[in-house]
Image (cartoon, rainbow, N blue to C red):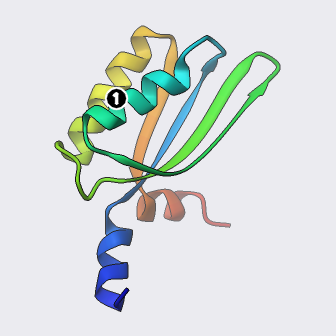
Amino acid sequence: MSINDQKKEKSNRVIITVVGKDQIGIIAWVTGRLAEESVNVLDISQTILQGFFTMIMVVDLSQASHSLGELSAKLSKEAEERGLKVTAQHEDVFAFMHRI
């Protein structure tokens, strides 16, 4: 993979976080919506802490059918209806906000 390909791949990576009270089907719901939008899941980590579900995903939007803003709004709206909080940020923004 050339340096230009690596930069292009990196520019399409987004961090998605999901937080809320644990319930059946959260992962299925999120990954199903991402699949519908042609978003590829690159990495995923989830845990349940004292009844609260937390998940962080790294996804690739290079084949996505909608922009990051549209995808974020759709997920946020549906998440709210489920009692969850979902955020989607470009990896550069996420890294900047969470730097030490």
| Nearer to the camera, 43 or 90 | 43
- Label 1, residues with CA under 10 Å away: few <14, some 14-19, many ≥20: some
Identified by mark 1, the residue type is: Arg
For the N terminus, the quadrant is: bottom left
| Rendered location of residue 72, percent (x, y) | 32, 36
In the rendered image, the vertical position of residue 71 relative to residue 39, given as above or below: above
| Rendered location of residue 98, percent (x, y) | 59, 58
In the rendered image, the vertical position of residue 8 relative to residue 17, given as above or below: below
Residue on which the image places disc 1: 33
Q: In percent of the image, x 49 and y 56: which residue is there?
A: 94
On screen, residue 77 versus residue 95, left or right, reads left
| Rendered location of residue 24, percent (x, y) | 60, 11
Identify the secondary structure beneath mark 1.
helix
| Nearer to the camera, 90 or 3 | 3
For the C terminus, the quadrant is: bottom right
Q: In percent of the image, x 60 and y 20: which residue is there?
A: 20
In the rendered image, the vertical position of residue 7 relative to residue 84, given as above or below: below
| Rendered location of residue 43, percent (x, y) | 55, 52
Q: In percent of the image, x 26 and y 59: which residue is there?
A: 62
Seen as rendered, the residue at the extreme bottom is: 2
On screen, residue 47 versus residue 45, left or right, reads right
In the rendered image, the vertical position of residue 8 relative to residue 60, given as above or below: below
